[in-house]
């Protein structure tokens, strides 16, 4: 199902054309990454998607009740604590105080907000403020979730959690669009990648589905040197690898031949 569609969209600021003839749709369940150089127009596309900006020509159609947006900069000078802010945002989004509070705590726990949910917003570090911005966007399951460089400033744990949260949100039927500069994050998260160059969409590529393999170490292997391995996540119990589905058999074989014990294998992103 099509959740948002840009048709022949152009955007001008004064006489300057920022976007030209952009055709792009995002469907329910998709994770679309917008990539391109600084200033190529990615954030502008995101703002058009959520309705924060209007096209100079062309049209934007949205088929979503709950739309959530995470801006690239989320600076708050508020005296409100993170948890009071999220309770308030939850109420605005139609949740009861109790549900908003429970959901806020669940999200802040998963994202490991340090300094506590009772810290005034203006005292939060950049990364922790980003965690609050993400929690705000996920208080209610959105139908359209749009995020501008959401990984910026996050620590390693929250980095992984964010990918899991976005994947879960898409699996529950949301259309998800985001910008990101790290090729590795794009490869391990997006189901489709759109490239923008000087305000024009230049390429669209579908990403292969990925399989996540968790295992306990045997003989030493530097997994990052294996071309099939998209991502390596070391953790206390061992390591978790992301490998394109279809090529995971070879990775499993290598692991077993080196005495590693495989604990779980699961497909985390389908095509
Ligand atoms: N409100 C505005 N008024 C005038 N120009 C703007 C405005 N917003 C964006 N621009 C210009 O539009 C162009 C595209 O900006 P945009 O923020 O969409 O790029 P981006 O691809 O997201 O860049 P980055 O990777 O640096 O975040 C830039 O040249 C920027 O200066």
Image: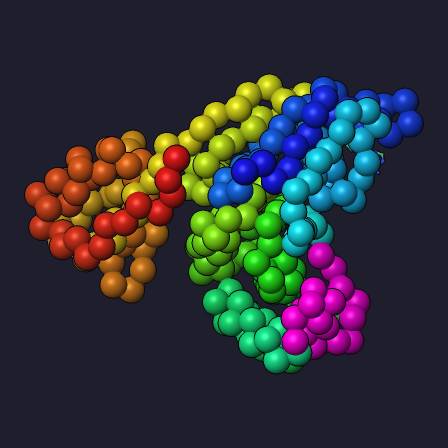
Question: Which residue is at the front of the view, 215 or 62?
Answer: 62
Residue 171 is situated, as x and y percent measured from the top left of the image, at 45, 49
Q: Residue at x 35, y 47 (%)?
A: 268
Q: Residue at x 51, y 72 (%)?
A: 106
Q: Is residue 92 magenta?
A: yes
Residue 155 is situated, as x and y percent measured from the top left of the image, at 51, 58
Q: Viewed as shown, does residue 241 lie left or right of 54?
A: left
Residue 159 is situated, as x and y percent measured from the top left of the image, at 48, 54
Image quarter for residue 252? top left
Q: Residue at x 75, y 76 (%)?
A: 80
Q: Viewed as shown, does residue 5 lie left or right of 218?
A: right
Above or below — where is 180 with respect to 59? below
The quadrant of the image that shows the C terminus is top left
Segment tinted magenta in the rendering: 74-96
Way the structure is coloured: rainbow
Image quarter for residue 217? bottom left
Q: Is residue 110 visible?
A: yes
């Amino acid at each position: 199902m099509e959740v948002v569609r840009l048709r022949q969209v152009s955007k001008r600021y004064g006489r300057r054309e920022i976007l030209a003839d952009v055709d792009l749709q995002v469907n329910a369940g998709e994770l679309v990454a917008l990539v391109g150089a600084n200033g190529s127009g990615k954030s502008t596309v995101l703002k058009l998607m959520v309705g924060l900006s209007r096209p100079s020509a062309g049209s934007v159609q949205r088929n979503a009740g709950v739309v959530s947006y995470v801006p690239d900069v989320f600076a708050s000078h508020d005296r409100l604590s993170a948890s009071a802010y999220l309770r308030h945002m939850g109420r605005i989004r139609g949740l009861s105080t109790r549900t908003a509070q429970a959901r806020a705590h669940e999200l802040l726990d998963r994202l490991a907000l340090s300094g506590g949910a009772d810290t005034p917003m203006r005292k939060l570090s950049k990364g922790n403020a980003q965690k609050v911005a993400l929690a705000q966007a996920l208080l209610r399951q959105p139908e359209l979730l749009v995020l501008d460089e959401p990984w910026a400033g996050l620590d390693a744990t929250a980095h992984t959690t964010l990918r899991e949260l976005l994947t879960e949100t898409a699996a529950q039927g949301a259309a998800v669009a985001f910008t990101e500069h790290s090729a590795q994050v794009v490869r391990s998260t997006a189901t489709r990648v759109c490239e923008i160059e000087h305000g024009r969409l230049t390429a669209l590529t579908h990403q292969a589905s990925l399989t996540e393999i968790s295992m306990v170490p045997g003989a030493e292997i530097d997994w990052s040197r294996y071309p099939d391995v998209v991502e390596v996540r070391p953790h206390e119990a061992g390591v978790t690898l992301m490998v394109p589905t279809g090529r995971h058999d070879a990775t499993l074989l290598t692991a077993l031949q080196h005495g590693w014990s495989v604990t779980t294998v699961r497909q985390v992103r389908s095509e």
